[in-house]
Amino acid sequence: MLYGALEAGGTKMVCAIGDENGRILEQFFVPTTTPEETMPQIIQYFQGKEIEGLGIACFGPIDLHKDSETYGHILETPKLPWRNYDIVGVMEEALHIPIGFDTDVNGSLLGEVTWGSAKGLTDAVYLTIGTGVGGGILSNGKLLHGMLHPEMGHMKLARAEGDTYHGKCPYHGTCLEGLSAGPAIEDRWGKPARELADCGEVWELESDYIAQALVTLILTLSPQKIILGGGVMHQTQLFPMIRRKVAENLNGYLNTSQLQDLDSYIVPAGLNDDQGIMGAVKLAIDAKAAELQTK
Ligand code: ADP
Ligand code: ZN
């Protein structure tokens, strides 16, 4: 069976055809400009592809409540042309197939839980540190939505000693995103993050903040594994630093087998940056299965 997958991002839309094993058979990219310009190209791509379902992993905020009038809409995004856009409704009308819908980060987490680093687990966290900081949560085998969906990138952090940077988040200043996302690194140090690879103090501070956030997530959600993705985590020297600081912060509190093996507990994404689009394939598979069940 073939499935369609759409990873809807703020700069580009990744469209793909995948199979039930998450194998990506072909891909197509469309720049994210306005719905009028972008969506017809996406629809045209999927039409005639004989897909049985479509999964959409979308930038937020989005409405995930099936009983809501605005289910499937993009909500109050700063990307103005997309505000209140009914992305699920438009695709449903064009393709007449079941559609699965979730956040981009929950999509990545679903890809990892189905085929990647967190395969088979029931409780996991995925944090992406890129242009922003976003997080997805799998709890008791289900992607967590709650009131809206988790927005853990905006948890407030305690500043590191001596750090006077005001923070880049327009809402909170020194939240996790305001202190550690790519644009915050560039703003603070005056150069794009990737050009600071050899600058030890950049990554010392970066790992301080990420570790602080991870400890809060560990204590709150009790995940079996944490996956870190996004452009900034391409600085792989961060992993051992973050693990060490998580251990220091926990200070011996909690003594699980997972926390004794932090190398396997805090890990990079395992699907070569395909976790998002593969997760969207899984959303499609699940939507099709749900439809078959109700028949
Ligand atoms: P997005 O969050 O927009 O989906 P990415 O996850 O690729 O996209 O994140 C882009 C951000 O990550 C940019 O702010 C960029 O500075 C940073 N980034 C990208 N590649 C690297 C790298 N190799 N090292 C450090 N930072 C990087
Ligand atoms: Zn914030």
Image: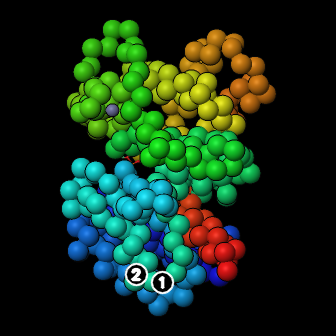
Above/below status of 183 relative to 271: above
Residue farthest to the top, as pictured: 162
State the residue at coordinates (27%, 14%).
164
Q: Is residue 294 found left or right of 256 in the rendered image? A: left
Work out whether residue 138 or residue 251 is closer to the camera in this orientation and state it. 138
Q: Position of residue 107 (x, y in %)?
A: 53, 56
Q: Amino acid at mark 1?
A: His
Q: Which residue is mark 2?
A: 93
Rate crowding at label 1 as few (under 14), some (14 to 19) or many (20 or more) other CA atoms within 10 Å. Answer: few
**Splitting the image into 4 quarters, where does residue 251 fall?**
top right
Query: Can you see residue 243?
Result: no
Residue farthest to the bottom, as pictured: 48
Q: Quadrant of ligand 2?
A: top left
Q: Position of residue 179 (x, y in %)?
A: 34, 27
Q: Position of residue 295 (x, y in %)?
A: 67, 80
Q: Which residue is mark 1?
A: 96
Residue farthest to the right, as pictured: 257
Q: Amino acid at mark 2?
A: Glu
Work out whether residue 185 or residue 217 is closer to the camera in this orientation and state it. 217
Query: Can you see residue 127?
Result: yes
